[in-house]
Amino acid sequence: MQVQNAFEVAQSSDAVWDLLMDVPQVVSCVPGATLLDTVGEDRWNAELRVQLGPMAMVFDSEVTRVEADRGAGTVRLAVKARERNGRGGASAEIRSELMEVADGTRVTVETDMRLQGAVARIGRSEIIEDRSEEHKYEL
């Protein structure tokens, strides 16, 4: 499933880039996410609490920065997550792209998500898309 979000911030692309490179800070901008620990320079463990339809779920997640190209203004993260109660899991590739605009920077976030197990049955694409639109990232 593909989900795309875009937003603009009144900050320079350099300032937004610096934030994107600070994954612990990015995690704090994601509703329901909590950083658990830093595993290495490009790896983190996080907890993600989500409500999908009638189900509340908690995922243990590994986040890896796969690529960062400052010149192109792109960052790619890979996420692997398992639901704590064994109801399935998810994996995602998240690609962020920065583009300077008149009043700051436009950030486009494309997420390619794959759901497995009960999570896939509960998390129909329209629910996931609705949830992604409810929360705008706060920078």
Image: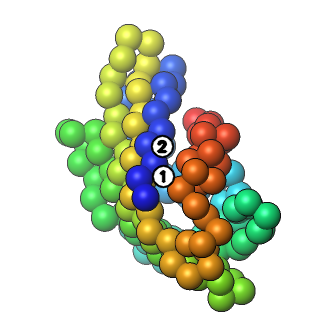
Q: Residues within 10 Å of mark 2 (few under 14, many from 20)?
A: some
Residue 26, percent from left and from top? 55, 50
Q: Secondary structure at mark 1?
A: loop
Labels 2 & 1 near each other (Cβ < 8 A): yes
80 and 3: which one is in front?
3
Residue at the image position 65 percent from the left and 88 percent from the top:
86
- Mark seen at residue 22: 1
Residue at the image position 43 percent from the left and 58 percent from the top:
1
Q: Is residue 34 above or below residue 18?
A: below
88 and 79: which one is in front?
88
Q: Secondary structure at mark 2?
A: helix
Image quadrant holding the C terminus, namely: top right
Q: Quadrant of residue 135?
A: top right
User: Viewed as shown, does residue 95 lie left or right of 57?
Assistant: left
Residue at the image position 21 percent from the left and 39 percent from the top:
72
The answer to whether any part of residue 114 appears in the image is yes
Residue extending farthest left = 71
